[in-house]
Image (cartoon, rainbow, N blue to C red):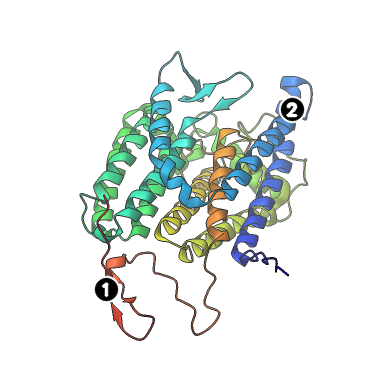
C-alpha cells in the first residue's frame, strides 16, 4: 500500500493575516457603498454604481492575490529587474500630456476608458522586489555602501523623482518608507541610513515648499480653521464629520458629510465617514486591524525561510502601514493631506489590485515561514539585522561553531 502525504497545516500567522485582510476588504466594500451613494446617485442615477465598480476591482484584486499566493515568492527574484524597467518606463510615459491624465493636480494616471491605472503602484512593488533581491544577494557585503546602500538609494531616488514629477506626494512618501525599511532590515549601518534619509527629507521639503499649492497643502494642517472655506475646507469638514460620530457613530449610511460637504469621501477621506457613521469604536476597529496586519507582517518577516523572504515581508508590511498612517493622519489633521488612499478600504482600482497582489506575496512567505521553536532542537530564527558573515553557524550539527564563507555574488 502507498501512503498519501498529509498536507502541512498552514502556520497560524498565515491564517490570522488572511483573516485580517479579508475583514479590511469587507469593511472597505461596505463603507464605499455608504460613502459614495450620494455622489453615485448624482452622477449615474443609481446609488450602486461606485459600489459595483469597487466590487469588480475587489474581484480582480482577489484573483491577483490568489495568483501571487500560489507562486513561490522566490520566483519573483527573476522578475524584479524586468518589473522595475517596465514600471520606470510607465512612470516616464505618464508624464507626457498626450498619454497621462491629470486628476486632482497630479498627472499620475493612464485613462483607459472605464478604468484608470496608476503606474506608481506597480513602481512600489517593483522597487521593493529589486531592493530585496540586491540586498539579499549582497548580505555578506552589507557594510559596503557602494554595493548595497548606494544602488538602492540611487534606484529609489529615480523612482521617487519620477513620482514627484507627477505631483504625487503621497506615493513618494510610501516609496521612501519601503526603501528605508528594506535597508534597515538588511542591516545597513544606522548612521549611514540616517544621514542619507536626512538629506533626502531635506531635499523633499525644499521641492515641496517651492510650489505654492504644495506649500499650502503641507502647512494647512497646522491651522485648518484659519482658512476653513478654502485651503482648510477639506480638513475642517473631515474633522467635523469625525467629531459628530461620537462613541458609536450616527449609524451606517447616515453620514451627513457625504452630501457634498466632504470632497473625496469615498476615496482619500473614507476614514472620516467611518468615524462619523461608526464612531470611535469603528475607527479604533479599523486602526486595530492595521496594527494587527503590522504585527503579523513583522512576525512573518522574523520567521521567513530566507533573507529575501524576510526583506520582502518587511517591505510589504512597511508599505501598508506607512500608507495607512499617512492617510489616517491626513484625515484627522495630524499630517498634511497627500492624496493617498486607505489600503484595502478606499475606492480605487490599481491601488487595490497591486496592494492585494503584494499581500499575496506576503501570505506566500507566511505560508512557508518557520513557526517559533516547538522544542529544544528547533532552530532559532535568524535576526533580520545581522548578516550571515556576523553569525556563528553550526558546521557539523554538534556543539562546535564556525564561520561559513559564501561566494561573492554581485
Q: Are the residues at dot 1 and dot 2 in contact (C-beta closer than 8 Å)? A: no
Image quadrant where residue 293 sits = bottom right
What's the residue at 51%, 47% (across, down)?
329
Instruction: Reply above or below: 230 against 27.
Output: above
Residue 256 shows up from this direction: no
Where's residue 52, x and y in %?
74, 31
- Residue 319, visible in the rendered structure: yes
Q: Residues within 10 Å of mark 1 (few under 14, many from 20)?
A: few
Can you give x and y, in whole percent of width and height, for residue 300 in the image? 51, 62
| Secondary structure of the residue carrying numbered label 1 | loop
Q: Residue at x 32, y 54 (%)?
A: 137
Q: Is residue 248 left or right of residue 382?
A: right
Q: Rate crowding at label 2 as few (under 14), some (14 to 19) or many (20 or more) other CA atoms within 10 Å.
A: some
Which image quarter is the N terminus in? bottom right
In the picture, the disc for residue 160 is none
52 shown above or below 5: above
Name the residue: 53% across, 53% down: 362
Foreground disc of the pair 1, 2? 1
Residue carrying label 2: 49
Q: Earlier in the sequence, mark 1 or mark 2?
A: 2
Q: Residue furthest front?
A: 1
The image position of residue 369, as x and y in percent, is 53, 64
Q: Secondary structure at mark 2?
A: helix
Give residue 214's position: percent from left, percent from top: 40, 31
Locate residue 183 relative to residue 113 in the image: left or right. Answer: left
- Can you identify the residue that label 1 sits on? 403
Residue 175 vs residue 74, the one in the foreground: 74
Residue at 61% from the left image edge and 31% from the top image edge: 263
Tally of numbered discs: 2
84 and 402: which is toward the camera: 402
Amino acid at each position: 500500500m502507498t501512503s498519501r502525504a498529509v498536507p502541512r497545516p498552514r502556520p497560524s500567522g498565515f491564517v490570522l493575516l488572511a483573516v485580517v485582510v479579508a475583514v479590511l476588504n469587507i469593511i472597505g466594500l461596505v463603507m464605499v457603498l455608504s460613502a459614495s451613494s450620494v455622489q453615485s446617485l448624482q452622477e449615474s442615477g443609481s446609488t450602486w454604481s461606485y459600489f459595483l465598480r469597487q466590487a469588480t476591482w475587489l474581484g480582480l484584486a482577489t484573483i491577483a492575490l490568489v495568483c501571487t499566493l500560489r507562486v513561490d515568492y522566490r520566483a519573483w527574484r527573476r522578475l524584479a529587474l524586468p518589473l522595475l524597467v517596465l514600471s520606470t518606463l510607465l512612470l516616464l510615459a505618464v508624464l507626457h500630456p498626450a498619454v497621462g491624465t491629470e486628476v486632482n493636480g497630479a498627472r499620475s494616471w493612464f485613462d483607459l476608458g472605464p478604468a484608470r491605472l496608476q503606474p506608481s503602484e506597480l513602481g512600489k512593488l517593483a522597487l521593493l522586489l529589486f531592493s530585496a533581491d540586491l540586498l539579499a544577494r549582497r548580505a555578506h557585503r552589507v557594510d559596503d555602501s557602494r554595493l548595497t546602500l548606494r544602488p538602492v538609494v540611487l534606484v529609489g531616488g529615480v523612482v521617487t523623482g519620477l513620482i514627484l514629477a507627477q505631483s504625487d506626494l503621497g506615493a513618494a512618501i510610501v516609496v521612501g518608507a519601503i526603501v528605508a525599511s528594506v535597508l534597515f532590515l538588511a542591516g545597513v549601518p544606522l548612521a549611514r541610513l540616517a544621514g542619507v534619509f536626512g538629506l533626502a527629507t531635506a531635499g523633499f521639503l525644499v521641492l515641496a515648499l517651492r510650489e505654492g499649492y504644495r506649500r499650502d497643502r503641507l502647512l494647512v494642517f497646522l491651522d485648518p480653521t484659519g482658512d476653513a472655506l478654502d485651503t482648510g475646507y477639506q480638513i475642517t469638514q473631515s474633522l467635523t464629520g469625525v467629531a459628530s460620530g461620537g462613541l458609536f457613530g450616527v449609524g451606517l449610511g447616515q453620514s451627513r458629510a457625504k452630501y457634498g460637504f466632504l470632497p473625496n469621501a469615498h476615496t482619500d477621506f473614507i476614514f472620516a465617514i467611518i468615524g462619523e457613521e461608526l464612531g470611535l469604536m469603528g475607527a479604533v476597529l479599523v486602526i486595530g486591524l492595521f496594527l494587527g496586519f503590522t504585527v503579523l507582517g513583522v512576525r512573518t518577516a522574523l520567521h521567513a525561510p530566507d533573507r529575501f523572504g524576510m526583506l520582502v515581508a518587511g517591505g510589504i508590511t512597511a508599505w501598508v502601514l506607512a500608507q495607512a498612517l499617512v492617510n489616517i493622519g491626513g484625515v484627522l489633521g495630524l499630517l498634511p493631506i497627500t492624496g493617498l488612499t486607505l489600503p484595502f478600504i478606499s475606492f480605487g482600482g490599481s491601488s487595490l489590485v497591486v496592494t492585494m497582489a503584494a499581500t499575496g506575496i506576503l501570505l506566500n512567505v507566511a505560508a512557508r515561514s518557520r513557526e517559533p521553536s516547538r522544542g529544544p532542537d528547533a532552530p532559532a530564527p535568524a535576526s533580520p539585522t545581522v548578516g550571515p558573515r556576523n553569525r556563528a553557524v553550526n558546521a557539523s550539527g554538534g556543539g562546535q561553531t564556525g564561520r561559513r564563507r559564501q561566494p561573492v555574488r554581485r
